[in-house]
Amino acid sequence: MKLHSYATKTAGRPALHRAGMLVALLFTLIATGCEPAAVARAPIKSQVPEKAIMRIECFGRYQVTVPAGSVFSVPSVTLPNVEFRAQREGAATLDAFQGKLKVFAQKLGTSPHDTEKSLLHRVEALGPDAAVIVFRESAAATEVFEIQGWRWLAPGVEYIAAGAATTAEVTADTPLFAQAAQNLRFRAPGTVPQSPGLCLQDAWLPGGAHRRESVSARLTLPAQGVTITLATELPVPKTRDDQLLARWNAAKRVSAPLPKFEELRNGTRMVDGRPAEELVLLANNDRGVPTLDAKLEAYGDRTPQRPTLRISMTVEQLDAAPGAGINQPLSRKAALELWDGLTQSIRQRAGAF
């Protein structure tokens, strides 16, 4: 299935994930939110038994309990005017980081611009492990600059704090990105801070609430064909018609005939101490193998203290035979238990604000 997610302006760009084509049609009609690209950390090591060993991970100002063998990542955090992006291949050493920075700046410096000497506008070293680069994105760009604050935190852990500024604002805005990059701290895997701030991928951004906070996280169990995305964001549906179950019910009315599916759940439940809408569907993928898709949305009040939560899970080959691409397929019962356990564990971190 290719599940299309139509992102809001504050949540990033649309993304796709694989599974059967039939379930794709169902959720294409109702999907919202952002499903970020995964940041690979380590290979899967174990199946998910009913009583699996678990661990706690944090994303933004929230925490969740996940299977110990899962791959968990927080690819991006967006604050007012700046997005923090974990780099897929962070430099292994400080010297390697400085080399990457030098090569990038040199490439910009030799790239022509229609009215300036090159795309490069400015490079400012903030220390051995941080720098700010200001540049034009293309030869024709004249009104907008891209600003990137680069930061190396530890072997393999590297970040870019990115945003844009107009020609009139670039001088005043550049120090803001420098400060954003310098504020980042290394966070050892598995540690969950109990003080105000935001959890990123192997990183920590201390501080109180911002007027806009959007966080995307992703969990995968490759051996079981499981992909789970989690997001916190401030926007809420404008009307009840924009909420999950209303979108699904409207899709069923106007999009006949739908592919054959089984509606396992359609209702409300409590998550993070508040009502949430839940939809769980089962349908065959393009290879005739049952595929489970689950979605849950808990709507906030437009404040960082109570953001909107969006969670989704896809199990690509439910009950598939071993060797069909999924080494350790989950049963329907095990998939729902995984979903329930994860969603019930989501809560705001102690001391998050």
Image (cartoon, grey):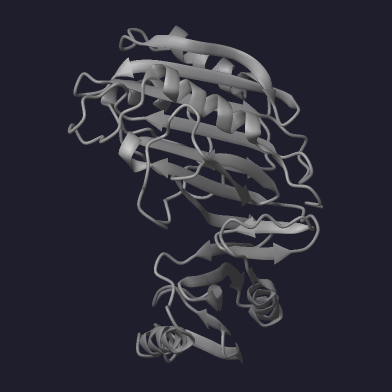
Name the foreground residue: 191 vs 166.
191
Write the residue at 69% across / 30% down: 299
Name the foreground residue: 330 vs 112.
330
Residue 30 in sight in this render? no
Using residue 294 as the reference point, say whether residue 3 is left or right of it.
left
Using residue 284 as the reference point, say whether residue 226 is left or right of it.
right
- Vertical comparison of 139 with 232: above or below: below
The mark total stands at 0
Q: Position of residue 121 (x, y in %)?
A: 52, 87
Picture quadrant where residue 285 is located:
top left
Name the foreground residue: 171 vs 147.
147
Using residue 135 as the reference point, say whether residue 126 is left or right of it.
right
- Vertical comparison of 195 with 120: above or below: above
Q: Position of residue 6 (x, y in %)?
A: 47, 37
Write the residue at 67% across / 75% down: 169
Q: Position of residue 100 (x, y in %)?
A: 41, 83
Q: Quadrant of the N terminus?
A: top left
Write the residue at 37% across / 42% down: 46
